[in-house]
């Protein structure tokens, strides 16, 4: 038996070596790179474990399942965003970028073996049920997610519309788990929304960066300009979890001069070292017509405020950072999420793929977004009394990638930002607020769910006030 086990181990080691050589050759094709030596001892250990499971586990396990779990484990232990995508997950990823899929509407990550909510997507079952950023999902129906891969958890949450699933959630500040029953829907994410807040002041919100986001943004900008003389514009990126890189480049290009640097990436391979400019080659993908030609001329110069918060991540941070570095807009709100890493989708055989972190993002001035985020020019909390809901950030995730350039902000806290003098005062009756003596978390929990762009949106009101002030200064300087 032992000799058979050793023989099988050698065969499996050879198989692993062959696979690694194949993958390494594929990754380095046409780059004239030398192949790295294979870790023979480690491969032998992997083979020994594989065979021990095959021979001694209490129940038979398929080879495919063991190898898939090994691949998944390799990737999930690198950082929170690298993952193995089986055929179904790979297909769902492709469908999701088109803005429509069946599920609950939650952006999730993993932590301590559980699924952690990064952000609920607006107008979805999860959002309406009050699921919050930072919630830990500990059970899906009656199945514990402890030890379940993020890919498997996402697969279980998605499904046919009108079917239900029970989520058991652990929430900070709650002594008992919270049980919520959600009914799956076809999640159609309208990536761009707009309106006129007040005469002369436009508002555009980017909910998520998808294939058609930049083209849709241009249409909304045209619509706003047609409604009258535009004195100021608010670009709202709050709670935007990101999405496609070329979508972020396109949105930035709508407001920046042609050929302006939007973002750069840096990684170990030559492909990962790139600069993305406000040019058609970098924001068009599979589209012949350059929709950016339709951007009204006034959009390039109108005073702008960009709103961000702890739910603004990845692509939304690219846009905020680009407009901030080029001094095209004032960034207002609270510190963003800090996901400044690039994930490359590498297709494998059998219609599966891996999502691998391959680079870091840098703003035009060379600032790393990773685990730090975008610090607003003007710090404005969600409420007049200076309170904001506690949010999960990249720096709070286990095994997050380091910044690479700057020291990280303290976990869970935004870097201190001095309010500018031109921020309107917060009102003299602040001391009369009945919640002023409550801890911030307690005061927040007593309030209804925050509605972005609603009548009580304090940050939006402050953005419009700032634009009015900038308009006055601009007129007085003429």
Image (cartoon, grey):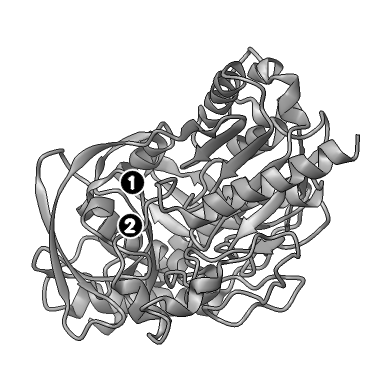
The single residue placed furthest to the top in the displayed view is: 289
Task: Give the x, y percent position of residue 239.
Answer: 46, 53
Residue 4 visible from this viewpoint:
no
One can see residue 224 in this view: yes
Residue at the image point whose x is 29% and y is 62% from the top: 448
Q: Which mark is residue 151?
A: 2
**Residue 305 on image: x %, y %:** 66, 46
The relative height of residue 82 versus residue 326 in the rendered view (above or below) is below
Q: Position of residue 475 (x, y in %)?
A: 83, 36
Q: In this orientation, which residue lies closer to the viewer: 378 or 147? A: 378
The answer to whether 171 appears left or right of 214 in the picture is left
Tell me if 446 is positioned left or right of 56 in this view: right
Quadrant of the snapshot with the C terminus: top right
- Determine which quarter of the picture holds residue 65: bottom left
Q: Quadrant of the N terminus?
A: bottom left
Mark sitting on residue 89:
1
Residue shown at 72% from the left, 33% from the top: 255
C-beta proximity under 8 Å, tags 2 and 1: yes
In the image, residue 367 sits, relative to residue 319, either above or below, namely: below
């Amino acid at each position: 038996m032992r000799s058979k086990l050793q023989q099988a181990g050698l065969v499996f080691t050879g198989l692993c070596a062959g696979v690694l050589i194949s993958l390494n050759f594929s990754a380095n094709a046409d780059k004239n790179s030398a192949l790295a030596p294979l870790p023979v001892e480690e491969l032998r250990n992997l083979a020994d474990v594989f065979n021990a499971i095959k021979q001694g586990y209490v129940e038979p396990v398929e080879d495919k399942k063991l190898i898939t779990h090994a691949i998944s484990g390799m990737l999930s232990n690198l950082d929170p965003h690298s993952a193995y995508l089986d055929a179904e997950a790979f297909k769902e990823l492709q469908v999701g970028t088109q803005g429509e899929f069946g599920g609950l509407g939650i952006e999730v990550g993993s932590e301590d073996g559980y699924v952690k909510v990064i952000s609920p997507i607006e107008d979805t079952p999860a959002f309406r049920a009050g699921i919050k950023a930072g919630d830990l999902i500990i059970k899906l129906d009656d199945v514990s997610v402890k030890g379940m891969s993020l890919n498997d958890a996402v697969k279980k949450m998605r499904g046919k519309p009108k079917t239900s699933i029970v989520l058991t959630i652990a929430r900070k500040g709650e002594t008992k788990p919270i049980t919520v029953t959600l009914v799956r829907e076809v999640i159609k994410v309208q990536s761009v929304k707009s309106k006129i807040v007040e005469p002369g002041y436009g508002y555009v919100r980017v909910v998520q960066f998808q294939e058609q986001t930049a083209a849709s943004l241009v249409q909304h900008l045209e619509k706003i300009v047609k409604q009258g003389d535009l004195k100021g514009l608010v670009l709202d990126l709050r709670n935007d979890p990101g999405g496609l890189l070329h979508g972020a480049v396109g949105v930035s290009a709508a407001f920046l001069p042609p050929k302006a640097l939007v973002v750069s990436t840096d990684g170990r391979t030559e492909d990962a070292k790139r600069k993305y400019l406000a040019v058609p080659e970098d924001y068009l993908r599979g589209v012949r017509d350059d929709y950016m030609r339709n951007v009204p001329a006034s959009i390039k110069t109108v005073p702008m405020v960009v709103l961000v918060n702890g739910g603004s991540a990845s692509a939304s941070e690219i846009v905020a950072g680009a407009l901030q570095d080029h001094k095209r807009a004032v960034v207002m709100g609270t510190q963003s999420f800090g996901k400044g890493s690039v994930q490359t989708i590498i297709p494998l055989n059998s219609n599966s793929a891996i999502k691998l972190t391959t680079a870091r993002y840098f703003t035009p001035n060379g600032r790393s977004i990773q685990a730090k985020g975008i610090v607003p020019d003007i710090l404005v909390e969600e409420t007049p009394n200076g309170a904001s809901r506690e949010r999960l950030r990249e720096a709070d995730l286990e095994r997050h990638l380091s910044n690479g350039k700057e020291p990280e902000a303290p976990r869970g806290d935004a870097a201190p930002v001095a309010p500018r003098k031109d921020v309107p005062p917060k009102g003299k009756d602040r001391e009369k607020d009945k919640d002023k003596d409550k801890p911030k978390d307690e005061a927040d929990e007593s309030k209804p769910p925050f509605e972005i762009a609603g009548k009580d949106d304090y940050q939006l009101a402050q953005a419009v006030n700032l634009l009015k002030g900038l308009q006055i200064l601009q007129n007085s300087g003429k």
